[in-house]
Structure formats: C-alpha cells, structure tokens
Amino acid sequence: MKINESAYKFIVCFMIFAFFFVPAFNAAGQPSVAPQKITLDIKGMDIIDVLKIISQRTGMNIVASKGLAGKVTIFLKDVDAWDALEIILLANDLAYVVDGDIVTIMTGREYETLYGERFKDKKEVRIIKLNYANAAEVAKALTQVKTAIGRVVVDAGSNTLILMETKDRLAQMEEMVKVMDLPTVTKIFSLDYAKSDKLNPKIQDMITKGVGTMRFDERTNKLVVTDLPEKVKEIEKVITAFDEKTRQVLIDAKIVQVELNDKFQAGIDWKAVFKDFTVQQTLSAGLTTGGKITLATLVFGKDRNTLDALMNFLGTTGKTNIISSPRITALDGQEAKIIVGTKEAYITGTTTTPATGAVTTAESVNFVDVGIQLYVTPTINKEGYVSMKIKPVVSSVGSRIKTTASPDGVPIIKTSEAETSIVVKDGMTIVMGGLMEDKVSKNMTKIPVLGDIPVLGFIFRNTNNEVKKTELVIFLTPTIISGDFIEPIPGMKSSST
C-alpha cells in the first residue's frame, strides 16, 4: 500500500501534536504529572479553595462542578499529590473524571446520575490512627494485600494510615490493622547456654512484621524482645527450647594390643568370642587397606567379671598389652579425638638462588602423627541412646626415603582407617576388633665377649628382623552425663588424654 505525500505529512504532524500536546495516563487513569510530594495543613477551608491550592502547587488542570460545596480539614505531610487529592475527594463524598489532562471534580450524586453507578463503589477511604504499631511498618504489610487500584498512604508525623481501596478489600485490611495495632510487651531473656547472635536469626523470623522488634546484646548475652503478648509467649518457648544445657557424653576407652600367636595369625575369631558373651548387635566396616573391622555391643553393665572374662579370652589368642585407657568427655554432637602414638620428625630444605650472591638453603623440621587415632562423635537421643560415629585410624612408618635435606629419610606412612556408626544404650560397651598390623622388631644374637669387640665384633653378631602379627582391640563405653558427678565405669582404668 502506497502513501501519498499529503497523507504522509498529515501523519507526521499528528504524531508531533500527540507527542507534545496529548497527556499521558498512568495505569490508574490518573493524568501523568511530575511525581511530587505535597504537605497540607488545612482546617475548615472551603473545598474550592483547597482544589485551587492543589492545582497551583502541582500544575493539575482541575475543573470544579457548580454543585461543589463543603469544608475540608486535613493534615498531610510529604504525601504524593494525586494521593492527597483522592483522599480529600473520597473523604468528602466527591468524585472525579479524567478527560485528557483535565480533572473534573463533582459530587458523588452527580457522578451517579451521569454514569449510573456510585463512585465510592470503586474505591473508599479509611483514615486509621495507630496507637501502638508503627504506621510505616504496618503499611509494608498492607501493601502486600492491596489491589492494583488500592493505595496505602502513611502520615509518619501522626502515625496514621490512609487506606484507599475497594469496599471488600478495605474490610480485610482494617481487620489486619486491628490485629497488628495491639498493646505490645517487652521482655528481656538472659541466655545461659545458647549464644544470642546464633539465636537471633531464628527469633527474627518469628517477630510480627510491622509490630515487633528484637535486639541482642553480645556482651551480656541477652535478648530484648518487643511484640504482641501472644507472640512473646511463643518466642519464649523457642528460646527455652534452644537455651538448654548441652548434654555431654563421657567416653571410657581401653586400647589393647594383642600379639597373636601362631594359631591366630589370620586374626581373632570374633564369631567364636560373641558366642560366649551377651551381644546386642554386630556390624562390620571395610578398611582402606583391605580387610574389615568388626564392632559389637556387649552387655557388660556393672559386672566387672564380664570384662575380666573377655580380657582372659584375649590372653588365649596371644600376648595382650593395654596400650592406653583414656577417658574423654565430648559435647553432644561434637567430635572427640584420642591419639596414642608418636610424632615422626623429618627435615625438608628450601633452596633460594638469588640473582647475585650465594645460594642459600633453609631447613625446617616437620612432624607427622604415627600410631592410633580414634575419632568419636556421640549424639544423644531422647530415649537415652547414644549414636556413635566412630573413625579409627592406625598408622605406622612403612619405609623411609633418604634425601639430601633428610639423611635419616622421610617417613612413608602406612595407614588403615574405617568409618562407621552404631547406636548403643547409655552405659553399654562397644568392642571393636579387626585392626591388624605387622609389628617388626630387630633381634640380635652374638657370641659373648667376641661380639662386643670393636670393628671386628660384627663377625660374631647376627641381626634379623622378626615380623609379628598384632591386632588392636578397642573398648568404648559411652555414659551420658546428667550432672557434675561422673561415675567411673567398672573395669575401665581412668586417665586423661
């Protein structure tokens, strides 16, 4: 389709006219005026004079019908100009019609006669002065439920809300304000065990929006809560639940090394052991170096003879040696660590080659843990059972690599470890077996006197390495501590680690 030159000129002129002279409208059908705030302090002023003031301050083109009459008393501070106009009109049963950039003001009856419906059916106004709640905070909550044509205006100076909304929604918003504008109470909570900064996020989520406040003092470990009485009671229950004494578990351990005789080179037959004792549960966990460990819950209770009987049985499998009997207390859910071993030292060197000058070498001594490491994390449940997350680590020096910095060699650590969990009743004993390792010892035989001759004595001496199979057996007895007194576990020698 072709457009001739005259039509093209007409379209261009019309677009220019529309751009400069046709007013824009917003989503609510209001003439688009520059956003601005207005403050009104009016008492008993004629409505015509009030409209004149608004027109002069905002640049709105306002036309008032002949039937307009009445006095206006209103106090608004820093309110959107169009909101101010709507508040005045709705409060005085007036209506408006927007035609282009002209706003025609008329009475509600005139509007109903012209359009066949009540102007107030579209939107009504309520002015609510709050007694307790903060108007600005309550407005944030009301804004979430208002309709697209609704308005929530805040007069911070008088702590007043002005609501413009449809009749049905306005009723809902008024009920919300009633619930939120209730007398508040303030309560100070002194925390004995929980930390106020840790508890703060949990309480913040419970505070009534627009009404409640919460502050915490890190120095005194106190919380100050201000909210509705019912809400403060709910918050108190949560604080009481979290501010309880952290329960503790006393872990008695006994670590026994069994040097196995020829009959038990493959390890202790734990199935045979469990036949002779009262066992509640057994389980296995794989080792990182192959093989597996076996755990069993034995009913020892306060019977010393039962523990002695088990130790006697272990004596039939080889030579037993109690390496350590540590006793350690762990908080509920916190990891406890038991180490029985040594720190192997080795030297490392760092060589620095400067652009000029001599090359320098700095040596440092490093240490690595070797021996038995036992990690235990107890968790207490309401029924008096203890869930034990157990991780045994057994390490030894397998060989050494000689370096220039470390003539004695850097140790190569051989490690076996496993990780498992088991649930036991308070005061019962866990037996852990299956941690096998080879124990290398040097044996020297010599001819008396001749073997001690310097230099030539080696002819009359003979040294050989003897490898012996050993198995570690670990006993763990968790006891829930409910007070300051700790009752010793029969058969478990107490010591500190």
Image (cartoon, helix red, strand yellow):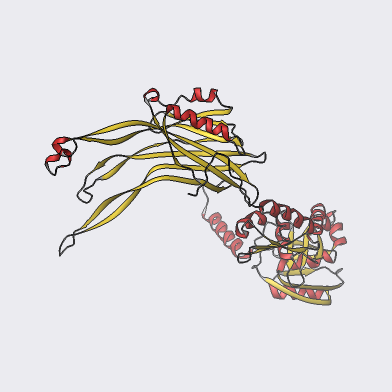
Q: Position of residue 307 (x, y in %)?
A: 54, 33
Q: Quadrant of residue 278?
A: top right
Using the image as rendered, state which of residue 445 and residue 206 is in the foreground: 445
Residue 299 drawn at (x, y percent): 59, 31
Height in image: 28 above or below 36? above
**Residue occupying the point 59% across, 33% down:** 300
User: Is residue 146 visible to the viewer in this orientation of the structure?
Assistant: no
Measured along the vertical axis of the image, is residue 69 above or below residue 204? below
Whether residue 451 is visible to the viewer of this picture, yes or no, is yes
- Left or right of 76, for residue 416: left
Q: Determine the residue positioned at 46% across, 30% down.
A: 314
Task: Give the tally of numbered discs.
Answer: 0
Furthest-front residue in view?
A: 449
- In the rendered image, residue 169, in percent from the top left (x then y), is placed at 79, 53
Q: Is residue 263 left or right of residue 19?
A: left
Residue ID at (48%, 46%): 337
Q: Which residue is nearer to you in this view: 28 or 5? A: 28
Residue that protrudes farthest toward the left in the picture: 456
Q: Quadrant of residue 221?
A: bottom right
Side (left or right) of 98 relative to 115 = left
In the image, residue 479 sits, relative to residue 309, either above or below, namely below
- Which of the pair 324/381 is nearer the observer? 324
